[in-house]
Structures are given as structure tokens and as C-alpha cells.
Image (spheres, coloured by chain):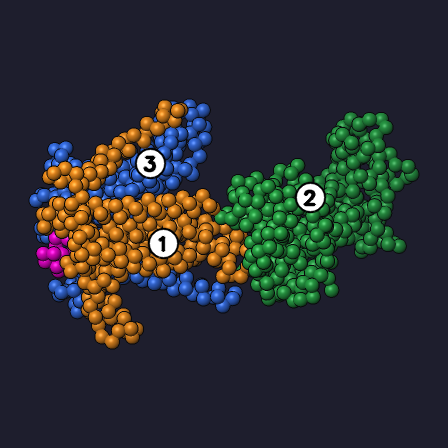
Chain colours: A orange, B blue, C green
Amino acid sequence: MKGWRDPVALLAIPAIAYLLLLYALPLLWLLMKSFIGPGGLTLKPYIDFFADPFNWRVVWNTLVVALWVTLVCLIVGYPAAFALARAGVALQIAMLVAIILPLSVGVVVKAFAWQIVLRRDGVVSQFLVAVGVWDEPQRLLFTQAGLVLGAANIFLPFMILPIYSVVKLIDPRLTEAGATLGATPLYRFLRIVLPLTLPGVVSGIAFVFSMAVSMYVIPSLLIGDRFQTLSTLTGRSFLFMRNEQLGSTTAVVLLVLAVSVVVGSSWLARRLGARA
Amino acid sequence: MTALERTARLVMWFAALVTVVFLMTPLVVTVAASFGSSSVFSLPPPDWSMRWYQRLATTRGLWPALFVSLEVAAFSTAVALAIGTLCAIALVRGRFPGREAIATFLVSPLMLPGLVVGIAMLQGFKVAGLREAYSSLLIAHVVITLPYIVRTVLASLSLFDFSLIDAARTLGCSYPSALLKVMVPALGPAFLTSGMFAFLASMDNYPISIFFTDGWTKTLPIQMLQYVEENPDPTIAAISSGLVLLAILTLVVGDRLVGLRKLADF
Amino acid sequence: MSFLDVSGAEKSFGSAMVLGGVDLGVAQGEFVSLLGPSGCGKTTLLRIVAGLLAVDRGTVTLDGEDITARPPHKRDVGVVFQNYALFPHLTVAENVAFGLKAKRRGAAETREAVKRFLDLVHLADFADRSVRALSGGQQQRVAVARALAVRPKLLLLDEPFSALDRKLRETMQIELRRLLRELGTTSVFVTHDQDEALTMSDRIAVMNRGAIEQLDRPEAIYRRPATAFALGFVGLSSRLSGRVIGTEGGLATVETAFGRLVAPGSFVAGAPVLLAVRPERIKVDPPGGYAFTARLRDAVFQGSKVQLHFETTEPDQLMVETTDLPDGVPAPGSEMKLGWAVADTLLYPAP
């Protein structure tokens, strides 16, 4: 086949080789090693893992938090992406700065900042009391709600930017055409705008959900040891408990989960792209 | 405009407001806390003081960690720019099968749990006989920076008109010379944006770096988390504010060179 | 009152007035073109009729109902856009069905209408294709089928053929006209191409700087353009600047570079005017004494006719189109006698 002798293809070799050797291979080896016990091929670590109800709770925690974070980011991020695309220059700059600046600052800085914000006398608490939602100041730190809030804050840009990049490509004449064909504003949104934004939405959801499933620093700082996710459990196993067996098992479970999200969203994106 | 359209507009602007306030709050709070005089975080601070900034000069381990992070980030970004661009060229111009799968593969480190990748690499390096922390960091961080480069440069290259290279060659340039004189300037914004994000991602990385530290080698995030655990006082807020300042400067430079809107195409 | 009645339409963007009080009446089943250069306001007027733009002052009435304040989806006015605006995420058939589905017509009715209109534009075989795989001409036909499938009272077309090559454009013009006539659809067509307007329209509205300068049948606009602009924009012309010497009995005598000429019109003595005549109305070596001499600068052989360009001083232009040259095409530099009927002369205030 001609393709294999294409000289341009050679340019890809350094990058591919680098990742294959130093990233894919170690991951595969980690995966394989977890199935090998003292007596050969074994599923025992996994059976033990899933037999323990505590571990089910950990998996559940991971998924629930990731789902909530994704939901919050979607609800705020979808209209915000439209606002960004339609805004005047001043608001656009304000939004872009607000989105990109935190990205540049780093997870540790932000997670730490949320520690301050979520305390009983922190800004969020004061705001909610002032608005009347709460009767008295409460602590959000070390709660699931606080974790979701902090994580959503850090991942929101990753929902807004992919949706924004799709929204700004939508031809305004399309909704005009829909109107001249007799479609009400709601119909135009549901049948024209929404379908066209779907690739961006899928992209955003994939990013945020996989990042939320994988996050380590944020739950470490914001929720503590009572509430374990797959990521924090893996970290603890390796770094504190020195239990490499458990660590490898949880790592693989986490990996499989994350890979499924990547593959699933990529398949979904391709199906949407093929249909459009 | 119908009532429904009016409501939709309101929702949109409300979401924009919420977004800006929500995203900026942690940064504002941190900077404010760094100027507080007491060693307990309270907002608004009872007294303004610069003492936490003065502490920065004497904080143990801070500056070495900063330099380690900067060096590792610079190195890995440079390597990623080099091999990532070459790979992007191959993916756009090549005719071999599986290009889409390869692109997904190259971007996948972004989406996978950093902790797992770190563990895998640590064990892999051990088997290969590499136990030194610093070199491990340098090698590992390329895996972090490469996806950012490939993603953005690939997108930019797919929009590039390759007939410009042919034109340069008919005007007397060799193929590599044409690439350098025609394509590199056109890809400038993509290099800058992706390089910036890759650099920051490397500076910010914790889950992979945590496995490659020793007594002398720590990256900044690891050092900072140590401070948070050992003695949490507003010095950390001061460090964070320093990073915020750095980020603002990067943003201003990036806007001058490329424009804010281009930066959003990360 | 006409089927479509636009009355006193005014529109400004900031300090720029784009439409200055425009009146337009279109009869049912009629095909009217809005013809003019870019910036004359024709597209703005179209968008106002469609409801995509709000008018500052004035009214729009369709079939006896005042639709000025109605949003576009309640107007029953179809639009074919310049870039077609086909929905990229839908197939050809789904695009055509869109309006019917939006108005909740039944599934059977929708299917039949889609089939009928795809047949009418000869795209029945493309029903399930993605619109992105179609050529420009095919996309254009889908856009027309989609707009017509809901049987709007009025169809607006915004330069729909501008992106097509000439041959395809001419074919589409004929096909579209035939289709609209068959369906009896009232249509308003925006274009900057005077040939297109002349070919297709029942009547043409020549627009310039936010106003309609003339609204009439194509022959009338060509033979008797109402303004100097209409004269210049539609068709070729010979133009001589001059000064009126006197008016008598509805005829003005004008002093031009080629002597005294007479034209129908009434002007004050001394008024600066523009005297014009269509090139094919000028005769070489005319019988009788009403003629003058000019020196030939250029002769352009065009097969069925010859264009003769004569030496003049700016801004005058003297050209003749003729098929009648018994001695063949003369050489540049020759002196020739030219003349034409007074009734064919046009007279305007100097622009």
C-alpha cells in the first residue's frame, strides 16, 4: 500500500514513539501486571476489590461527584458560551479574562483558594446568608456540595470553550431561514441551534467528566479522608499506605473508566459528525 | 421579540455574569487574603500588611522548587513543540491509514487520570533503570505538554494553505527553508497559544510530578501543597498571588502577540 | 391596494439613512425586481418585508393585513437567501420538509409536498443526501424548493444566482421563472445585474441611495428611463452634456458639443442638462438634415452588430450600435454623419 512508504509519515515517528514507549507501554504493563499474582494469571485482586462494599462506595462517590460537576458546568456553561459568542467587546474581554486567567494560574492555587472561600466565614457562606438561602453561616468545606462547587469552578472553562468554538461558527442566516419558514423561536432553537451545538457539548462533557473522574488535588484539599474517590484512594494506597497491590487495582479501575469516557465520547462525536 | 426570546436573553446574560463572578472569586479572595495581617485567613482582613510577601524571600524550598518547575516546563514544552509539530505535519499531509486514531492517541494524556499515568511511568522507569528524580521529571512532563501542542497545531495546520510552500519553492527555497520561512510564521499564533498552555500545564501538574520527587527535587505545586499541609498561613496566599501576577503578565503578552480571542482556541 | 404594499418605509443605521421613505406595490402573481448597485437599500427593503429587520417608519401590508409589527415566522413570507442558508445537519428532504414540520402539517401532507417540490426542481433522486455534498446550483434549487414547499403568499429572493457561473445562471433564471409562473407565486427579486432583471421581471424597481427612482415594465425602463441614474444603470447609452437655449411646444433646444439638438422636455433657458439616446437608435448617414458629424475613434466588431465609439470630450460619450454598414466597418479617424429621431432623445437635469 502506498501509504506505508509515504515519507511525510516519518515525521510522526518521534512523537508516536515517545508516547508509545513512555506512556502507552507503561500503562499497558500496569494493566497487565494487575492480572498477574504470585501463582500466575489471577483476577483475585479485582474480586477482592469489588467484594468490599467500601470500594463500591468509592466508585459511586467518584461517579456521582463527576456527574454533578458535569451537570453544573453544563447548566452554567451552555448559556455562558452563547453569551460569549454574542457579547460586545467589553463583556467578551471580561469573560475571556475570567476564563483564561484561572486556567493559567493552576489547580493548586485555585483549590487552595476554594479552601478559603468555602469556610464557615467564607465568601460563599456570607453570600448565601445575605441572599436568605441559609439562616446562619455554614461550612461548605469538607462537604460534597463544596467539592462539586470547587471542582465545577475549576473545570467550567473546559465546558465553555468547546461549546463557544462551535456556537460562533453557526451562520445567523440559518435561524433567519427557519423564521421565514414559519418556525417559532423555540422551534428554531430546538431544531436548528441545539443540534448544531451538539458536537461542542459532547466535547465539553467529555473533557469535564473525565477530568472530574480523574481529579486528585481538588478532593485532597476540599474534602479530606472521609470521602474517597478512586483517584484519592489510589494516591493514598501508593503514597501513604504503601499498598501497591491495592493501588494498582484501583488505578486500573480508574483507567478503564476514563478510557471508556474518551472512547465513548469520540464515537459519539463521530456519529454526530457523520449525520450532520 | 417574544417573551420567550426575552427570557432566553436574560438567562444568557445572567449565566455570563455568574461565570465571570464565579471564576474570578477564588483569585480575588486569594489576593485579598495575602494582604491580611493576621496568620488566620479572614475576609475582609482586619489589617493590611505585606509581611507574607516579605516572608517569601526566606521561605525554605520555595525558590528551588520554582526553578525546578520552570526548567522542567521550558524543556518539556520545547521538546513537545519540536516533535509535536513534526507529527502534526505528518498527520495533515500524510496519506497513511489511522490518522484519526493516532491524533486521539496523542491527545489522550489530557483526558486520562494523571495519577494513573504517573504510577505507570514510575514503575516503567524503575524497570528501565531510571531512578533519578530530575531526569524522570524532564521525560515525564513531555507526556503532559505534547497533547496541548498536537491538538492546537493540528487544528491550525488543517487550515494552512500548503500551496504557499510550493510557491516558495518555485521562488528558490528548499523544502526545509520553505517550511521555515512560510509555515512557521503562519503557525506562530498556534505555537504561542499551545506553548503557553502546555507550559502552564507543566508548571501546574501535581499527579504525575508527585511520583518523581526526592529531597532536592520538588516542583512548585508539590512544594506548595506541602506548605498547606504543614503550616497553612497566608504565605501560601502570597505565593499564589505571585502566580496570579505571572498569569496576568502572560495573558497581556499573549493578547499583544495573538489577541485574546485566538487564545481561546486552545 | 396592491397584494404587497410597502408604504413610506424609512430605515437608518445610526446616522446613515439607508431607506428614505420608499413606496412599493406588487400585484398578486407578479414578479418584481429590485435593481440597483450595492448600498442602494434593496437588501434592506427585502429584509424589512421579510420581517428580519424592523422599519423605523412606514407600513408593510400583505393580502390586506398589516404585517409591519409581525415577527417573520408569522408573516407567511418565504425567503431564498444569497448563500442559500441550508441546514447542514439535515438532508435535502428534511430541509424541504422543515417549514411544513414547523407548522405542524401532517406527515402524509409533508411527504407529498416534499416529493412534489423536489420533483419540480428536478432533485427527487437527492432526497436523502446531505446538503453539504451538493453543488452550488443544486443547493440553490433546494433553497427554492424549501421556501416554496410551505406555499408562502410572497417569495423574496436575495441575489440567489450571484454565486453561480453564467451558463448555470441563465438556465436557473428560466427555470425559476417558469416554476413561479406555474405556481402563481408573487415574488420580489433583488439583484444588481440589469440583464437578469430585464430578463425575468414583470416590473422593475430601479433603486438608488435608498429610493426607488423608477418602477415600471422592463421595456418602459429601457426606452424611457426616468432619471439619469436609471439611464446609466440599465443598458448602454450615448450621453452629451449641454445647456438649454429655449423650450417651445414641449421641445427643448440644447446646445451641445456637436451643435444644437432637440429633445422632448421642458427646461428653463440656461439650465445645464444631460442629453442621451440609446446607441441602437442612432443612424449612420441618416436621411434628412437633422444630423451632425463626428470622428470615429474605435470600431468594435461583435458579430451580429458593430459598436462604433466616437471622439468626444469628457464627460460626453458617443457610441452607436448598428447592423447597417453597407460599406463595411470604417477605419478609425473617419468622419461619419450621425443622426436620430427627436422622439428617441432623452433629456435630464445635469447630474
Instruction: Look at 45% across and 30% down and name the residue there.
Output: B163
Of the residues shown, which amino acid type is indicated by label 1?
Ile
| Badge 1 density bin: few <14, some 14–19, many ≥20, Cα 10 Å | many
> Looking at the picture, does residue A62 appear above or below residue C261?
below
Return the chain for callout 3: B
Q: Is residue A22 visible?
A: yes
Name the residue tied to disc 2: C175
The image quadrant that residue C13 belongs to is bottom right
Residue B102 horizontal/vertical position (percent): 33, 36
Secondary structure of the residue carrying numbered label 1: helix
Judge left or right: residue C76 versus residue C346: left
Residue C336 horizontal/vertical position (percent): 83, 32
Of the residues shown, which amino acid type is indicated by label 2?
Glu
Return the chain for callout 2: C
Q: Are marks 3 and 2 on the same chain?
A: no
The image quadrant that residue B12 belongs to is bottom left
Secondary structure of the residue carrying numbered label 2: helix
Name the residue tied to disc 3: B102
The stretch in magenta equals B225-237
Residue A42 horizontal/vertical position (percent): 16, 41
